[in-house]
Amino acid sequence: MKPANVRTKKELANLALKEFVENYKRKNFTQLKEKIKFAEGYDYKFIGIYVETELPNG
């Protein structure tokens, strides 16, 4: 158990479960990324302008 830097089997199991969940979430995100289709003319940079500054009143 030295390579994982844990002392007990319970710590090892918790670490393995935590890593499994993180990898599962990452995998689902990459699958979702392939399915996203943006509208024609969508400009992500335009939205970024308002993220850095305050939104205009109106």
Image (tube, rainbow, N blue to C red):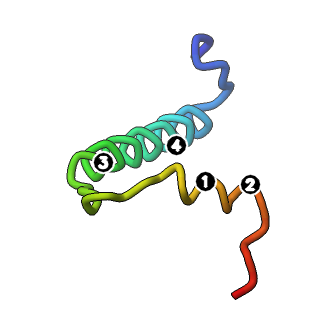
Label located before the other in sequence (4 or 2): 4
Q: Position of residue 46 (x, y in %)?
A: 54, 56
Q: Which residue is mark 3?
A: 33
Neighbour class for label 3 at 10 Å: few (<14), some, many (≥20)? few
Q: Which residue is mark 4?
A: 18
Do tag 2 and tag 1 residues touch (Cβ < 8 Å)?
yes
* Residue at point 58%, 11% (across, down): 3
Label located before the other in sequence (4 or 3): 4
On screen, residue 1 above or below 52: above
Neighbour class for label 4 at 10 Å: few (<14), some, many (≥20)? few
Q: Quadrant of residue 27?
A: top left
- SS for callout 4: helix
* Residue at point 36%, 45% (across, down): 24
Label located before the other in sequence (1 or 3): 3
Which label is found at residue 52? Answer: 2
Do tag 2 and tag 3 residues touch (Cβ < 8 Å)?
no
